[in-house]
Amino acid sequence: MTSLTSVDAEPTASGRFARSLRAELRNVRTTRGTRWALGLTASLWVIVGAGFALIAVLLDATTVSVGAALLGMGSAVTIFIPILAIFIMAADWQSRDVLTTYVLEPRRHIVFFAKVLAAVIVCATLVLAAALLAVVFTAVLALVSGAAITWNADAETIAVLLWSAAVGTVSGIAYGAATQRVAIAIVFSLVQGFVIDPLLTLVPHGVGNWFRLSAIADAGSSGGAIGPALTAGVLWLVVPLAVGFVRNQRADVQ
């Protein structure tokens, strides 16, 4: 009699990555803190965008501006999207969930890049959905008020919105990975945007402008400069990402 033994094939690197990515995307739905951050962020974006459109109607009752709604949403994006990315990168480091993650997938670099891609996917989807809802609310507002819709959202406005969202996403990923603590990363993100960046503008001869995170976002508009964006990108994005990757590889899992 011939005995047949079946042996499970070792998953490939791409298969491991896909499995980790699915797990990270599932964590966004199941982790309470991340789920609350997701819902709160989307709601605030829509409210701010609709609020800007409403203010535009009050100033000019004959038209409702789609561009105003998108720009209003864009101002909220720069504040809240890093927070969402921070939750995705760091939330499970504050619980025993990360221990389970590394038991299922011991190759830590795979988990790290799966978290990064999950943050990009979630944040990009949220930005597009919120922009669509802002446009829908603007149309509803125009219908209720009897005003005409002004479709003045040109390509530059949309590009600035998307670029700001991309910068915010990467900065949140970097800070969350480097600190591995949600509260610390959020505080640092807010301090960086509301304290450090403004203080750098006071440095004589414009030297501080080369190190402002907002210089990266400004590079997405027609008046932005590439040089300051590159130096700020290395300081605020590349270095924290590198630190986060190393810490992800070496940190003790409690």
Image (tube, rainbow, N blue to C red):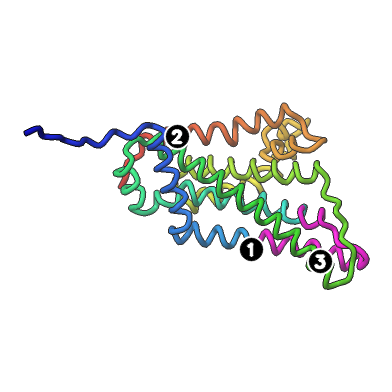
Check disc 2 and give the amino acid type: Phe
Q: Earlier in the sequence, mark 2 or mark 3?
A: 3
Check disc 1 and give the amino acid type: Ser
The disc at residue 202 is none
Position of 48 compared to 14: left or right? right
Residue under the image location 78 percent in, 57 percent down: 69
Position of 3 compared to 106: left or right? left
Q: Looking at the image, which is closer to me, 213 or 113?
A: 113
User: On the image, which quarter does residue 50 sit in?
Assistant: bottom right
Farthest-out residue, front: 1
Residue under the image location 45 percent in, 43 percent down: 21
User: On the image, which quarter does residue 144 sit in?
Assistant: bottom right
The kind of secondary structure element at disc 3 is helix
- The location of residue 225, given as percent across then percent down, is 77, 30
The kind of secondary structure element at disc 1 is helix
Q: Earlier in the sequence, mark 1 or mark 3?
A: 1
What are the residue bounds of the magenta stretch? 43-70
Check disc 3 and give the amino acid type: Leu
Q: Disc 1 designates what residue?
A: 43
The nearer-to-camera label among 2 and 3 is 3
Residue 129 sits above or below residue 222 on the image: below
Residue 103 sits above or below residue 83 on the image: above
* Cα distance in 3D space between marks 2 and 3: 44 Å
Number of residues whose C-alpha sits closer than 10 Å to that of mark 1, classed few (under 14), some (14–19) or many (20 or more): few
Q: In terms of secondary structure, what is the magenta stretch mainly?
A: helix
The kind of secondary structure element at disc 2 is helix
* Cα distance in 3D space between marks 1 and 3: 16 Å
Q: Disc 2 designates what residue?
A: 245
User: On the image, which quarter does residue 137 sit in?
Assistant: bottom right
Q: Disc 3 designates what residue?
A: 54
The nearer-to-camera label among 1 and 2 is 1
